[in-house]
Image: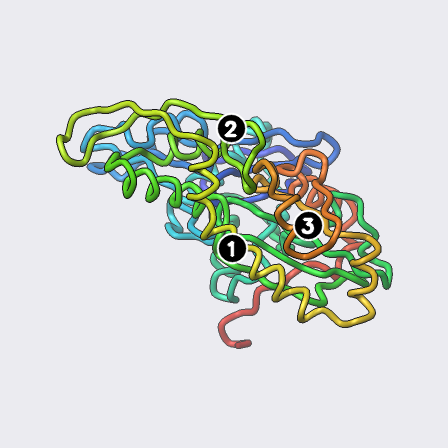
Amino acid sequence: MVKLPKWLKISIGSELAIDLGTATTLIYMKNKGILLDEPSVVAIDKTTGKSLAVGDEAKRMLGKTPGDIIAKRPMKDGVIADFELVQEMLHFFIKKVTKRALLTQPKVLIAVPSGITEVEARAVKDSAESAGAREVHLVSEPIAAAVGIGLPIHEATGNMVIDIGGGTTEIAVIALFGIVTNVSIRVAGDEMDEAIIDYVRRKYKLLIGEIAAERVKIEIGTAIPLKEQKEMEIKGRDLITGIPKTLRITSEEVTEALKEPLSQIIDAIKKALEKTPPELSADIIENGIYLTGGGALLKGIDKLIEKETGLNVKIAEEPRKCVVIGAGKILEDLEKYRKVLRRPKKPYEE
């Protein structure tokens, strides 16, 4: 474990559950609830390599920084893309929620994609330890989401959870404290944003940024055609003239743009259903599918999945927060949930 710097002061007894997402990081403190919900973005000075801003402040810099400053996401497709920046980000967020009260390092539980490799899982654990955690546990996101919803994961009844985040879509059938069937794909909210950027570039020869694309997705994005079409104004750079340009885009166009990433998610859901044992399939027919993650907020996505699978789909309350709420519940009763914790293997164990 990396030695804790003297200047890092953290409260005695702090226990934190972290949803370390590609787009957003949420932190839950034991007995206090969710204390942080900020973008997973870090702005750094390219000359010195030092971080200048993290979270909300850094996201406002995306696409707007001068040459000597870069704002970037250190997470990609649910896993660490830049170890040092993730360490910086976690250190900043942990320090922010614990108020630097005293000298003891916190115990941390981090939710990770179920499909990550042992190397990727070790990187998450190491980054949290380097950021100041004294003890680090990992749990798969679908398990955390199921606990967050309040599903009885200890029973012999199968429940299907689909968690659509920023970098990954996790599809799992859970029973008896374990994942029976699991499909994890690196297609989720970010790929939806990229699809909108590509569509606007191809159709209108207009280049828009990821923040603009995300706003389009949130405001008028829909997985199925709407009876009443919506539209909004977007601004970008004309690729032919190089001059800033404004145009209007419709919800119907956004639906067209999102077809490819949504079809990949649907294919993954069907694959998971095909792999599910018949006895648990019967439970899913009765209980339906539970939808969590920020992607669950895309208008009509539940109806699209229902149409493609013939199953009832329920969107969780506060779907963006299900994973961190579930991780928090697991943290508050680690003995009860010890079976669901993931222990990254040491290199010599592989």
Q: Are marks 3 and 2 in contact (CB under 8 Å)?
A: no
Task: Report whether residue 3 is seen.
Answer: no
**Amino acid under disc 2:** Gln
Disc 3 crowd rating (10 Å Cα; few below 14, some 14-19, many 20+) is: some
Viewer-side residue, 250 vs 10: 250
User: What residue does disc 1 label?
Assistant: 263
Cα separation, mark 1 vs mark 3, equals 13 Å
Viewer-side residue, 111 vs 157: 157
Q: Earlier in the sequence, mark 3 or mark 2?
A: 2
**Amino acid under disc 1:** Ser
Give the label on residue 306, or none.
3
Looking at the picture, does residue 304 appear above or below residue 116?
above
Viewer-side residue, 247 vs 124: 247
Q: Position of residue 210 (x, y in %)?
A: 36, 36
Nearest to viewer (mark 3 / mark 2): 2
User: What residue does disc 2 label?
Assistant: 229
Q: Is 50 on the left or on the right of 172, as rendered?
A: left
Per the image, label 2 sits on a secondary structure element best described as loop
Looking at the picture, does residue 20 appear above or below residue 187?
above
Q: Is 236 on the left or on the right of 317, as rendered?
A: left
Q: Are marks 1 and 3 in contact (CB under 8 Å)?
A: no
